[in-house]
Image (cartoon, helix red, strand yellow):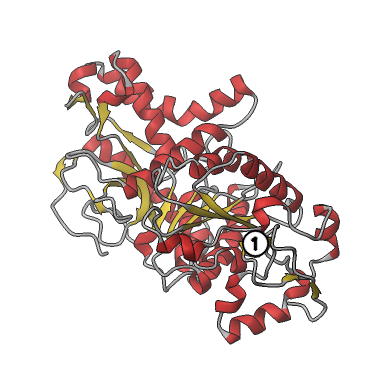
Amino acid sequence: MAFMAAAAAVPSSSSASTILPSRPQTSPFQFHEHAAARRSSPALQRRRLRSRSRRNQLVCCSLDATKQVVQEERPAAVKDAAGRTDCFGVFCTTYDLRADEETKTWKKVVNIAVSGAAGTISNHLLFKLASGEVFGQDQPIALKLLGSQKSFQALEGVAMELEDSLYPLLREVSIGIDPYEVFQDVEWALLIGAKPRGPGMERADLLNLNGQIFAEQGKALNAVASKNVKVLVVGNPCNTNALICLKNAPDIPPKNFHALTRLDENRAKCQLALKAGVFYDKISNMTIWGNHSTTQVPDFLNARIDGKPAKQVIGDTKWLEEEFTKIIQKRGGVLIQKWGRSSAASTAVSIVDAMRSLVTPTPEGDWFSSGVYTNGNPYGIAEDIVFSMPCRSKGDGDYELATDVMIDDFLWERIKKSEGELLAEKGCVGHLIGQDDELCEVTEDTMLPGDK
């Protein structure tokens, strides 16, 4: 069938705390309780007090020579792992954010949370964020790093490296293991941390295991984050994890949740450019449809090369229909064979690309790929799942789905296969999204190479 999507709008502390003497005025770096504790509701404060014995106190930093140093008690295991109970360097301090915000030189600080912050993807990503690659050279940021008790010492190491890099835009860094603390007031949440697939683990088991992580993080975002927070889910299976997260955050618009398929788009652009003998910047309108799995659909029908249809420029229909998709699906596995590790660096680059696509106006006529909530989509794709589709943005952090899209029988057949897989995944996590009557019928293993 020949299909042109009709234009349609998309719906949018512990009582044992120790008070230490104030430091001399010549050394203004001081540690204080996280501001979140002062801004939180009484109910949330009571919840935190009741559960403090099982949580790590968030390490945060502030420059304030007028306040005493207050040090919260942390669990002994965390103290031992961290090797210290006090703060270190500029990451136990912040600049006077209020004064900075009143100046004309700086914009208001953007708060960014990153889970899995001690992992290899974050090890590339955090330095890109701090250098201004996403928001520009006049936008200061605060990084809120979420890890686990096991990774707490590594989080301190990450903070030390950020400290040593002297990024002028990086105005605050905090580290912790409790999402209710780390996510306080964040405007962006990059959810990278997820458990890897262990030996003998079925895909349905991974869906349930990681789904519990993202359900909890969704609840935390709903409770303490900005109500317009933008959430980008990277931890796999990212489409279904994004669905779980949004279903557990009912006060945040579902449209604000994204699953990362930008790396797949970048890989597809690379292969089209290589085949056509042009540079990457000549490739536009590249869409990844569906799930981040081997059912994903790299769309050569709508892709353009130097403004012309890709099929017209390449002319090799057999390569496009039979080889192109397989190359994209297997790219990560080939990289692991060559490099001996997964694609952490290029994943970090694609996260930056995905964020920048939302804060920078999309070039006229072009679009980008992102896994988004399907309710109200103009393509006929099943609702209530997270599905990668072509998006456009005005640069305000929001997006609209592209409607000037062609879908033929070949493309539609593959889109429906990926849709079916996501519906099956949804059935496996019904207990995490308030739909206990769903059945788990994941019968085929379609995890991408490198996800196992």
- Give how far across and how far down residue 223 sits, in percent: 52, 74
Outermost residue to the bottom: 42
Give left or right: position of 164 versus 309. Answer: right
- Give how far across and how far down residue 94 sits, in percent: 59, 58
Please say if 146 is above or below 405: below
Question: Picture quarter containing residue 263?
Answer: top left
- Give how far across and how far down residue 160 sits, in percent: 68, 45
State the SS at label 1.
loop
- Residue shown at the point (55%, 78%) measured from the top left: 39
Q: Which residue is mark 1?
A: 60
Instruction: Indicate the quadrant containing the N terminus: top left, top right, bottom left or bottom right.
Output: top left
Q: Amino acid at mark 1?
A: Cys
Question: Picture quarter containing residue 36?
Answer: bottom right
- Residue shown at the point (79%, 67%) measured from the top left: 74
| Res. 437 in view | no
- Give how far across and how far down residue 151 sits, in percent: 73, 50
Give left or right: position of 145 versus 7. Answer: right
- Residue shown at the point (43%, 62%) measured from the top left: 101
